[in-house]
Structure formats: C-alpha cells, structure tokens
Amino acid sequence: MKKLSLVVALLVASSTFIACGGSSHTKHENTNTKMTQDTNRQFGIFKVLRDNHTIEMDGDIKSSSLNNFDKLIKTFPDIDKINIVNCGGSLDDETNLKLSHKVHQQGISTHLMGNGEIASGGVDFFLAGVKRTIGKNTKIGVHAWSGDGEEATHFHKGHKNHLPYINYYKSVGFTQKQAEDFYYFTIYSAHADDIHWMSKEEIIKYHMLTHE
C-alpha cells in the first residue's frame, strides 16, 4: 500500500513539474513575440504605436530618416499623427526638408508632447503637420542655419540660399509673407551656435499652431 502511494505521489509530482515547465515556456514565447512585434514597429527615430495610426518620434533627424519613414508608411499606411517626444534638430537639412514635405503630403498631424522639446530642423519638421498642437511645458527653439563656413545671415534678404526654407514653409501652408516673416525671424533670432526659445506670443505670431 505504501509502495502504491509512493508511485501515485511521484506521478502527480512529475505531472505538476511538466505543467509548470510548459507554462514557463509559453510565457517565454509570448515575451519573444512581443519583443519581435515591438522591433517591427521601430523605424529609426520613429516608432508605430499599437493603434497603427500614431507614430512616436524621439531623436534627431538623420540622412537615414527619410528611408526609414518610407518603409514605415509602406508597412503602416494609415498613419495620421506624429507625437514628438524630442527632436533637437537635423544632421541633414536636405533630407529633413524632403521628409517634412512628405509628412505634409501624407496629411499627417504633428503634436509636441508635454515637456517635449524641438529645435532647429526639428521645428521645420513640426511645421509639416496639417494640424499642429503642443502639450504643456514645451520648448520650441530656433536659430540661423550654417554650412561650409557660412551662416544664413551672411546672405542678404532675397538671396537664393534662403529660398529652400521659404519655399518649404509655403509648401506646408504658409503664405509668402508668413513664410518670409518666420524664416527671417529664425535666422536673426540667434546665431547658428546659439538658440532662441520662442515665447508664447511668438508662437502665435508666426502661426506655429493650427488651433490658435
């Protein structure tokens, strides 16, 4: 009788061990699946959220950002909003303008999240939104661009080197006057190695938001 009881006890213990082992394996598989799904939603500085309509953006715009965005839109064609956590600028202005123009063409809105910060090329990107909003305690910084030893203010108003930016602002909905006013405000507000944080009055004056 004792021997039979021992056999039953061993069988029960063995079954319990196997069951527990199976549960642990399932959890491990689920974790791996979630990690894979999250990886598949990350495209450089862009991450697609679970609703498949919203992008979370965090980081500076690079030469690879346009290609990453194209891949993202091909995989998730229903994107209609970009939540910007932080974007300190662009390491490639030409790519940034192309990327920003594409965002506008796609009919995507932009939102600077609470406590978020955008500066320089990050501001140009933000302006691509067909609707533009900001959260609380946000910062928007502008300054003159520079390159090849030259700074924007080295060229007189109306110079061809200013046109790519002015034309970009027009392409995202600014009038000629609004585009010029904002552009010249930015380049004279601070040198390329400095930054000017826009006041609430300036944000309204230069049409940064669409819900004024």
Image: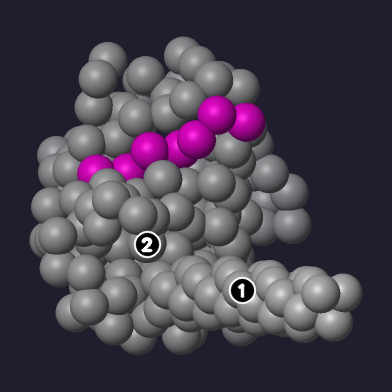
Q: Earlier in the sequence, mark 1 or mark 2?
A: 1
Q: Residue furthest front?
A: 1
In this picture, residue 48 sits left or right of residue 123: left
Task: Pick whichever, 76 or 87, lies toward us.
Answer: 76
In this picture, residue 187 sits left or right of residue 181: right
Q: What residue sits 62% from the left and 31% below the top?
A: 115
Q: What residue sits 73% from the left and 49% below the top?
A: 194
* Three-letter code, disc 1: Ala
In this picture, residue 154 sits left or right of residue 55: right
Residue 27 visible to an observer of this rendering: yes
x, y percentage for residue 127?
A: 32, 46
Vertical placement of residue 7 versus 143, above or below: below
Task: Pick whichever, 1 or 31, lies toward us.
Answer: 1
Vertical placement of residue 157 versus 26, above or below: above
**Where on the picture, by quarter, is residue 137?**
top right
Please provide the residue range marked out in magenta: 109-115
Number of the front mark, 1 or 2: 1
Vertical placement of residue 90 versus 157, above or below: below
Residue indicated by mark 1: 19
Task: Pick whichever, 45 or 14, lies toward us.
Answer: 14
Q: Is residue 17 magenta?
A: no
> Where's the N terminus, which quadrant?
bottom right
x, y percentage for residue 50?
A: 35, 54
Q: Residue furthest right?
A: 2
Q: What residue sits 55% from the left and 29% below the top?
A: 114
Residue indicated by mark 2: 48
**Where on the picture, by quarter, is residue 109?**
top left
